[in-house]
Image (spheres, grey):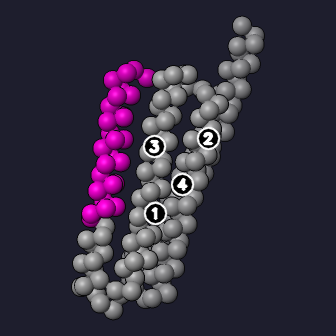
């Protein structure tokens, strides 16, 4: 990967992290307060839903930071570094936590009758996508392990 691609990806990652920080600190609290005023019967959900949304965004930020750190590893050590496993494992854990947060949000909305069927369907879709992402990154982790093993075997032969 050339330096321009890595620089562009880092700029994009930094922008995404910045936008997510703005969402966490400004947009979500304002939106939650507005919804609580508009729908007073669900005002009790303001804090729990806000906490779930903020922690979900933290999970996304963790993934972005791990990708950033893996770019650093790629630049320093090449594409097959055993140190990348801790970042890949952290990405998988963040995806699993985010998926669990979706389940908790769905349970909360269902228990309080605050969600219509389309929201529930969208939430279930999110759970399926999250599970698929976790499994996909798990498969990629296995491919990384295999590539590192093959690289070590090749270096012993040469």
Badge 3 or badge 4: first in the primary sequence: 3
Q: Nearer the viewer, residue 23 or 133?
A: 23
Q: Are marks 1 and 3 in contact (CB under 8 Å)?
A: no
Is residue 3 within the magenta segment? yes
Q: Give the vertical position of 44 relative to 83 (above or below).
A: below
Cα–Cα span, label 3 and label 2: 12 Å
Badge 2 or badge 4: first in the primary sequence: 2
* Picture residue at 28% right of the left edge, 87% below the top: 39
Q: Secondary structure at mark 4?
A: helix
* Picture residue at 35% right of the left edge, 48% below the top: 17
Q: Position of residue 49 (x, y in %)?
A: 41, 75
Q: Secondary structure at mark 1?
A: helix
For label 2, the residue is: 86
For label 1, the residue is: 55
**How many marks do you count on the picture?**
4
Badge 1 or badge 3: first in the primary sequence: 1
For label 4, the residue is: 94
For label 3, the residue is: 65
């Amino acid at each position: 990967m050339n330096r321009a691609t890595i620089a562009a990806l880092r700029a994009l990652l930094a922008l995404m992290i910045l936008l997510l920080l703005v969402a966490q600190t400004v947009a979500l609290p304002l939106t939650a307060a507005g919804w609580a005023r508009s729908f007073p019967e669900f005002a009790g959900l303001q804090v729990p839903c806000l906490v779930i949304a903020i922690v979900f965004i933290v999970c996304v930020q963790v993934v972005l930071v791990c990708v950033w750190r893996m770019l650093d590893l790629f630049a320093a050590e090449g594409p097959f570094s055993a140190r990348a496993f801790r970042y890949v494992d952290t990405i998988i854990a963040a995806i699993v936590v985010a998926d669990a947060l979706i389940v908790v949000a769905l349970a909360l909305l269902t228990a309080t009758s605050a969600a219509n069927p389309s929201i529930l369907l969208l939430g279930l879709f999110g759970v399926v996508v999250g599970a698929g992402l976790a499994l996909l990154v798990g498969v990629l982790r296995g491919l990384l392990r295999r590539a590192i093993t093959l690289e070590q075997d090749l270096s012993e032969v040469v």
